[in-house]
């Protein structure tokens, strides 16, 4: 996206002079819902004023609230990483961070992580191993054991509640059927499989009875893990409780699917086996394929959303469409299993 098309406050943040700390180089990364500024030793994450139905950031008040939720929830797993809320203020045609004037945006300020230790880079370099998987399992097992549960959260694990999330994906991607990333046959095969599994209400009831529905992470995959010491598992879902209140199987299936996506099927199986044993979850496997399919489809959907956002550049669009195609193919593979 050309800099001229960015919001004025984001253009302001592209300048090293905008920051009260050294920022020799400032880099902007975009997702379908955020502007992320990498500035020196810190990261500033600003929510886009978008409404996708499953999230609504359309007012400044909502963006502030969800920034605060992002800080609160992510500090469960990485308290040292999430530093605080920063107001981007405007006065007399100029902007500043926590300066004079009224807030025009809010940012979550984070400590910057070492890029060479981001899990995606470690995977690309062929350096992910079982020892690292063991370290991740050692973090996740106590996290889920301590995570809030109870009757109100457990309701999100019923077949009916899960179907809201799953079927929403199909509704939101109907207009993309026939594009290079998603064929009609794929769409029908995946949606038919998902609907058939959702009819197995007994399986969902068993998971609820076992206390497996928790206030989870919601977005557990390699893009949100830094293999530093300690490992940082960050960027949980803050914008919609029904994506975070879920079966633990749905959460860990996301990381297992992600390992499959990167061609690491053996490590994916090792992760699930290790997690199941360490957590005493003997019915995890019964839900795994369904939730892997769901998570792969979600990633494909997000790729389509990002590729078709007007503010992204041509290279980003091409990359996102290619990834979406691969995710949908993986979801189809799970559906056919």
Image (tube, grey):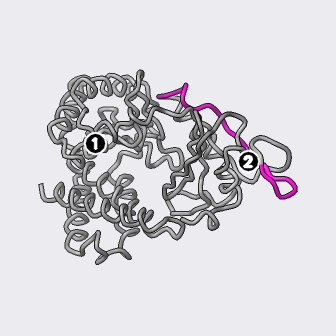
Question: Eyeballing the image, is 187 above or below 207?
Answer: below
User: Where residue 23 is drawn, which disc sits there?
Assistant: none
Dot 2 surroundings within 10 Å: few (below 14), some, or many (20 or more)? many
- Answer with left or right where residue 22 lies relative to residue 192: right
Question: Eyeballing the image, is 95 above or below 248?
Answer: below
Which percent across, then down, holds residue 241?
A: 49, 46
Q: Residue at x 66, y 52 (%)?
A: 62
Q: Quadrant of the C terminus?
A: bottom left
Q: Is residue 110 magenta?
A: no
Q: Residue at x 26, y 28 (%)?
A: 133
Would you identify the image quadrant in which residue 217 lies? top left
Q: Nearer the viewer, residue 171 or 111?
A: 111
Disc 1 and disc 2: Cα gap in Å? 36 Å
Q: Residue at x 55, y 51 (%)?
A: 28
| Residue denoted by label 1 | 124
| Residue denoted by label 2 | 88
Would you identify the image quadrant in which residue 288 lies? top left
Q: Earlier in the sequence, mark 1 or mark 2?
A: 2
Dot 1 surroundings within 10 Å: few (below 14), some, or many (20 or more)? few
> In this rendering, which labeled residue sits more in front, label 1 or label 2?
1
Which percent across, then down, holds residue 36?
A: 55, 48
Q: Main secondary structure of the magenta part?
A: strand
Q: Is residue 88 magenta?
A: yes
Would you identify the image quadrant in which residue 334 lies? bottom left
Which percent across, then down, holds residue 294?
A: 29, 54
Which percent across, then down, holds residue 272?
A: 21, 34
Element carrying mark 2? strand
Which region of the structure is painted magenta?
Answer: 77-95
Q: Quadrant of the N terminus?
A: bottom right
Q: Nearer the viewer, residue 246 or 169?
A: 169
Q: Residue at x 51, y 51 (%)?
A: 29
């Amino acid at each position: 996206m050309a800099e001229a098309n960015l919001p004025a406050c984001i253009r302001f943040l592209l300048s090293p002079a905008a920051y009260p700390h050294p920022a020799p180089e400032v880099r902007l990364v975009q997702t379908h819902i955020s502007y992320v500024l990498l500035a020196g030793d810190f990261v500033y994450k600003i929510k886009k004023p978008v409404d996708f139905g499953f999230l609504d950031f359309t007012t400044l008040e909502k963006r502030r609230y969800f920034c605060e939720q992002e800080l609160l929830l992510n500090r469960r797993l990485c308290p040292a990483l999430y530093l605080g809320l920063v107001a981007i203020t405007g006065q007399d045609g100029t902007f500043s961070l926590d300066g004079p004037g009224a807030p025009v945006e809010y940012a979550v300020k984070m400590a910057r992580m070492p890029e060479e230790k981001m899990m995606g880079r470690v995977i690309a370099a062929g350096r992910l191993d079982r020892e690292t998987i063991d370290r991740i399992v050692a973090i996740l097992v106590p996290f889920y054991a301590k995570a809030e549960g109870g009757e109100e959260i457990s309701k999100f694990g019923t077949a009916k509640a899960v179907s809201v999330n799953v079927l929403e994906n199909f509704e939101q991607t109907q207009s993309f059927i026939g594009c290079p990333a998603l064929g009609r046959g794929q769409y029908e095969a995946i949606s038919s499989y998902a609907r058939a599994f959702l009819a197995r209400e007994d399986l969902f009831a068993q998971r609820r009875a076992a206390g497996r529905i928790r206030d989870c992470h919601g977005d557990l995959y390699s893009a949100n893990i830094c293999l530093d010491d300690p490992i940082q598992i960050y960027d949980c879902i803050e914008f919609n409780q029904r994506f975070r209140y879920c079966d633990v199987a749905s959460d860990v299936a996301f990381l297992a699917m992600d390992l499959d996506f990167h061609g690491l099927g053996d490590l994916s199986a090792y992760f699930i086996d290790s997690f199941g044993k360490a957590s005493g979850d003997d019915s995890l496997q019964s839900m795994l394929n369904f939730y892997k399919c769901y998570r792969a489809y979600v990633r494909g959907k997000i790729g389509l959303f990002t590729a078709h956002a007007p503010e992204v550049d041509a290279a980003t669009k091409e990359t996102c469409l290619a990834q979406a195609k691969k995710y949908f193919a993986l979801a189809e593979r799970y559906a056919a299993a």
